[in-house]
Amino acid sequence: MSAPITVRHTHGEQITVAAGGVELMTYVYRPDPEAFESRKPYVHPLRTLSGRPVSGYRPHDHRWHKGLQMTASHLSGQNFWGGNSYVHGEGYLPLPGRIGRMRHDGFDAFEPSDDRLAFTERLSWVENGGREWARERRTVAVHSVEPEEGAWALDWSIHLTNVRSEPLWFGSPATAGRERAGYTGLHWRGPRDFTGGDVLGPDGRGGDGEAGAADMMGVQAPWLAFTGEHDAVDAHSTLVFAHAPENSGAIHESHWFVRSEPTPTVAVSWAFYEEFELPPGDGFSYRYRIVVADGAWDGDRIESYLTSHGW
């Protein structure tokens, strides 16, 4: 049974959801001021039901990594990921003229209940020169806050429409020539103490540390899990990232981008190996689930949870 939640909305800034005295997540839609980090909404902190932190914010190696956020690392020559831009043959370069942003335009729906929060947000993707390239309808839902399971769930959906008069091309550093650097799309950065964590996937894929991450890098699979061990306390936590069933028919096939070392990170990459085109006026949709759990979950427990908690 889902436990009651409380919701605090600081209008114009952020939304916090708590349960059992623990702030589980904060959705910040008034973005940080540094334009080079690609200003956009993000979720941080993320915590388990026992209060363990499971997201990182502005780590010194990548200041633009902020908890859980939607990104697009290579979009028609612009960078909606943040930070240095990859240029084939030259490596990563600080190119502030390429950095775009995702502007919060308002909420179409905000629906709290005793055990669930869902909200729908309107955003504009604005290239560096100030032109609107895309409009997004984003829905975020917090639900299934279940102490008996030791877990809660966050669903994140996106519908993005091209409002330019020409196509948008979605890619990644890998499509630009950097092998296996296919990061783009919904991205999570883990806390520093999750470095070296374990990565699992279906059918026994994955394993310990970076070897497990390497086994899942660039792979198609319905889910991927990352388990880390916390500093200061004798505890592990697990995050499970899952595709909604309809994602299999989305505009372009997705692959997992995951690293355990030197940076604990997962991205549901929609352009790992190849670019894809979004014509003028067209749109695409994806829907994801992130399960935030106390403890080190194995594959059987993950499969059981995902099966019993339908979409």
Image: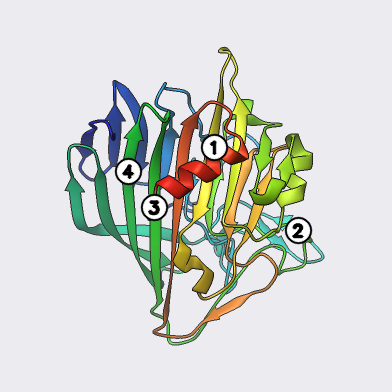
- The residue that label 4 is drawn on is 142
Estimate how packed mark 1 is, as few (under 14), some (14 to 19) or many (20 or more) residues with alpha carbons within 10 Å.
Answer: few
Q: Nearer the viewer, residue 138 or 291?
A: 291
Q: Position of residue 102 (x, y in %)?
A: 41, 59
From the image, state whether disc 3 or disc 2 is nearer to you: 3
Task: Pick whichever of labels 3 and 4 is earlier in the sequence.
Answer: 4
Q: Which residue is mark 3?
A: 310
* Residue 180 numbered tag: 2
Secondary-structure class at tag 2? loop
Measuring from the top left, give residue 154's x and y in whole percent.
39, 45
Between the C-alphas of marks 3 and 2, the distance is: 32 Å
Q: Which residue is mark 1?
A: 301
Q: Is residue 137 above or below residue 210?
A: below
Label 1 vs label 4, nearer the camera: 1
Amino acid on which the number 4 mark rests in the picture: Val
Is residue 68 left or right of 205 when viewed as pictured?
A: left
- The first of marks 1 and 4 along the sequence is 4
Name the amino acid, label 2.
Arg
Label whose residue precedes the other's in the sequence (4 or 2): 4
- Distance, label 2 to label 1, CA atoms, is 30 Å
Image quarter (top left, top right, bottom left or bottom right) of the N terminus: top left
